[in-house]
Every structure is written in C-alpha cells, then in structure tokens.
Amino acid sequence: MLAQVSDPIIMVAKQAGDVRIHTFVSSFAYGNIANATHIIETKNQLVLVDGQFLVPYARAFRSYADSLGKPIERLYLLTGTLTTGSVWGPRSATSRSTRCRKP
C-alpha cells in the first residue's frame, strides 16, 4: 500500500498559437513510480497522452485537465496500461462521460 505521495510537477511545456502542451509528472519520492502524462490543448478540446500509474496522481491529473474547462476528445495510451493490469484507471482519469478506447 502506498503510504504517501508528494505533489506532482505540472507545467506548460510548449505553446504555439492556440495549441498548448501541458506535462504532468508524478513525483519520484517515497519510492513511487514517476511517469508523465501530457495534455494537448487546442482552442476547443483536450487530447490526453498516456496515463498515471497511481490513483492519487490519476485523480490529480483529472482535476488539472478539468480545470482547463474543455472536453476531453481523445486518450492515447502508449504504455499498454489497460492491458497490463497496472491500472491508473479509466475510472480515475476518464470518468464523467469520457469514453476510453484502444485505437
């Protein structure tokens, strides 16, 4: 069981015109798994790239995505998260009317 998690690192990595790329990195502290999740923000929507492995970070990521005030159009999983059992959870990060599907 995970005893504690520290705050993630959140940054806007790049901006070009109306497109912003946000990077959300879970903290590598207390023996946690550090990984990055990205948001491509356009004028009208969000595209998520990859997921968080630990539920507290997945929930924090979802809160951050929601704070941008745009709908999530797509989710691309690059690590096989849905099939490996290391679930950060479509429930945690893509609930509330967002569908999660493999390409």
Image (spheres, rainbow, N blue to C red):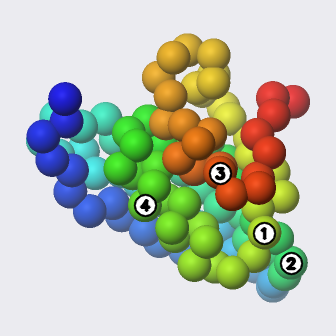
Residue at image mark 1: 71
Q: Residue at x 57, y 78 (%)?
A: 67
Task: Say what secondary structure mark 1 lies in.
Answer: loop
Q: Earlier in the sequence, mark 2 or mark 4?
A: 2
Task: Say what secondary structure mark 3 lies in.
Answer: loop
- Estimate the x, y position of residue 92 in percent, counting from the top left: 53, 47
Q: Is residue 10 visible?
A: yes
Q: Is residue 2 left or right of residue 71?
A: left
The span from disc 3 to disc 4 (Cα, nearest Å) is 13 Å
Dots 1, 4 in contact, CB < 8 A? no
The span from disc 3 to disc 2 (Cα, nearest Å) is 19 Å
Task: Say what secondary structure mark 4 lies in.
Answer: helix
Mark 4 closeness class: few <14, some 14–19, many ≥20 residues within 10 Å: some
Mark 1 closeness class: few <14, some 14–19, many ≥20 residues within 10 Å: some
Q: Amino acid at mark 1?
A: Pro
Residue farthest top in this picture: 84
Q: Earlier in the sequence, mark 1 or mark 4?
A: 4
Q: Nearer the viewer, residue 42 or 56?
A: 56
Task: Say what secondary structure mark 2 lies in.
Answer: loop
Mark 3 closeness class: few <14, some 14–19, many ≥20 residues within 10 Å: few
- Estimate the x, y position of residue 57 in percent, counting from the top left: 39, 51
Q: Amino acid at mark 3?
A: Ser
Quarter occupied by residue 18 = bottom right
Q: Earlier in the sequence, mark 3 or mark 1?
A: 1
Residue at image mark 4: 60
